[in-house]
Amino acid sequence: MSRVRHVRLRFVTLLAALLALVGTALAAPAQGAGGSNWWEPVARPAPDAAIGVTGEPFTGTDAQGRVRGFVDAHDHIMANEAFGGRLICGKAFSAAGVEDALKDCPEHYPDGSLALFDMITKGGDGKHDPVGWPTFADWPAHDSLTHQQNYYAWVERAWRGGQRVLVNDLVTNGVICSVYFFKDRSCDEMTSIRLQAQKSYEMQAYVDSMFGGPGKGWFRIVTSSAQAREVVRQGKLAVVLGVETSEPFGCKQVLDVAQCGQADIDRGLDELYGLGVRSMFLCHKFDNALCGVRFDEGSLGAAINAGQFLSTGTFWQTEQCTGPQHDNPIGLAPAPASVQSQLPPGVALPSYAAGAQCNTRGLTELGEYALRGMMRRGMMLELDHMSVKAAGRALDVMESVSYPGALSSHSWMDLGWTERVYKLGGFVAQYMNGAEAFSAEAKRTDALREQYHVGYGYGTDMNGVGGWPGPRGAGTANPVRYPFRTADGGSVVERATAGSRTWDVNTDGAAHYGLVPDWLEDIRQVGGQDVVDDLFRGAESYLTTWGASERHRSEVNLAAGATAVASSAEWNPFTDFGAARAVDGNGSSRWASDWSDDQWLRIDLPATTLVGRVTLDWERAFARAYRIEVSTDGTSWRTVWSTASGDGGLDTARFPAVPARYVRIHGEQRATAWGYSLFEAGVHRS
């Protein structure tokens, strides 16, 4: 065993032990929830940022036993440890205190002249006052993308303001790290993910030390929905670890050749699960060996496309979309000279047709293998950043086994997929937009949430280099008036203060994580109480999705290995396309019919049983119109499901369960000039 692997295993073993301690602490009775001022630390460092919230945090559940509170489904507490360690300046916590935590990167002194990423993301010359604590003259700010926004006391303020679930996405990007001038550590993505996980547990211990010891703090990393519910019942903050990275498990692709295999995926998923990760993205920003991405647009899209080339040796490729969903348009803005200069001599960014808005790359075979591995482990899939083609196939796979763990955490999924996510039992959150835009989008999708009885979430994406709500202005007709009460009515919120600086959401916008309660009050002023009420139900809905994912068990495929016959089979001297190929459990073999419309595949089940779901994994030769028929005697047939608008891929036909001994897929109209062809057909009870 190599020394590196030995060290890695020791690290995972250590974290597993920490997780066991966490589980023990969470299984114990509520720590101090009934004591005097249990929410106040006994040993907060001094000086430090003020919390600015008074009153006891709400505990327990509602009359129906549901947890209450807001959920941030997408945040990056430890992003300062990513991208080589110097892209995001400042730390979420420091044993040396706030002055050490909230200080700028060394190269930003004395006036920000070398703040190169500031120049790229904010424009201008990047100059700013680098001093953080105690003056905070220029940062944190809603439009400063390179400074720490997740200082622990600001997260604490959000918790005191009613937030009860926070998804801490461990994030990095090896290419950004490699091209950025200032860094102090390796660009290996998995190395960064491990470090951020470690720092998250260290932050938990740091908070615990203020409240009297292990398990007593408000910041609780959880690894199951049951643990999370207990944490929220106690009135504390349940922190879920996720992963958002461009090359998970080293699964990049170079010149369209995958640089990983199934063993790498299994090993990577096992390691992430051992670290406590329960949700993840399979691709982010760059196409990889698992899936294609949803493009960025404009000049930022040009920059990321250049990064795509540096990472993979290929630029994004586009095609006409086959349905109403589409990826973001690219190629409609000129590439900045600074971007073009990063490419090798003679290589130029391509131009794209305005009407071709879909990535040609979808979910690969390795990506589907990774998704099914996640489902076996009860992990949740982040659909954001997936291309339309990849997200559509991922939803097909999840629907085929009724797997609920689908997430859209920060508005990077085509909104046309929203109802499919809700039908599965998944969860949707909106990016932390300004109060007007956020409220308008919340109301646009309100009917869907009412139909599926779900709450709503937000994804702050802080430390995620995305930009956050600016101020509406003190002169607006409906400003946030300080002090105000939290959504539950039990606490009072004053303006946020740290050192000599005070922030007001009316004039500063969402400058840092501590302004989340103020932003929610701004939403109440703009969008009304109904929007806030939907958000207050978010924690329950998120945990419902997670719990259902943990409990999911795939039903037995009744068709596996069954006898199958067909109306015809395409003749080929080298390959067998017989009916049995559609039920042999091999996703590479297939049944193919003659090249005419009226064709069928019949599956003979071992015995008469209730059947309520049929899954069909079509090859390119799919059916535009077909029906599902059942019979108990093989002679009298009954149609239980049909469509005239088949689109290929992986179809799931659901219908009220009926007794069946035989199931027949009857093609009526081909979608191509060829016949009908199925990789695999599945029959299930429900």
Image (spheres, rainbow, N blue to C red):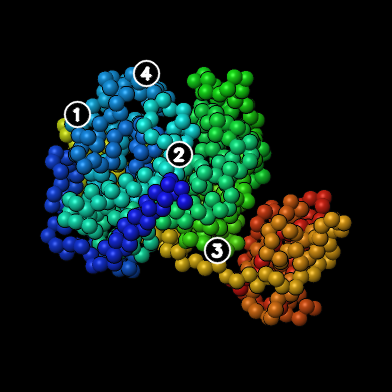
Marking on residue 402? 3
Q: CA distance from mark 1 to mark 2?
A: 35 Å
Asked if the residue at tag 2 contacts the one at tag 1, i.e. Cβ–Cβ closer than 8 Å, the answer is: no
Marking on residue 188? 2
Q: CA distance from mark 2 to mark 4?
A: 30 Å
Marking on residue 180? none
Q: Residue at x 47, y 61 (%)?
A: 378
Horizontal side, residue 466 vs residue 215: left or right:
right
User: Circle 4 sits in a helix, a strand or a loop, which is it?
Assistant: loop
Q: Nearer the viewer, mark 2 or mark 4?
A: 2
Three-letter code for the amino acid on which mark 2 is drawn: Asp
Graded by Cα atoms within 10 Å as few (under 14), some (14 to 19) or many (20 or more), the crowding at tag 3 reads many
Above or below 421: residue 556: below
Q: As rendered, which of 560 and 344 lies closer to the eye?
A: 344
**Residue under circle 1?**
135
* Quarter occupied by the C terminus: bottom right
Three-letter code for the amino acid on which mark 1 is drawn: Thr
Graded by Cα atoms within 10 Å as few (under 14), some (14 to 19) or many (20 or more), the crowding at tag 1 reads some
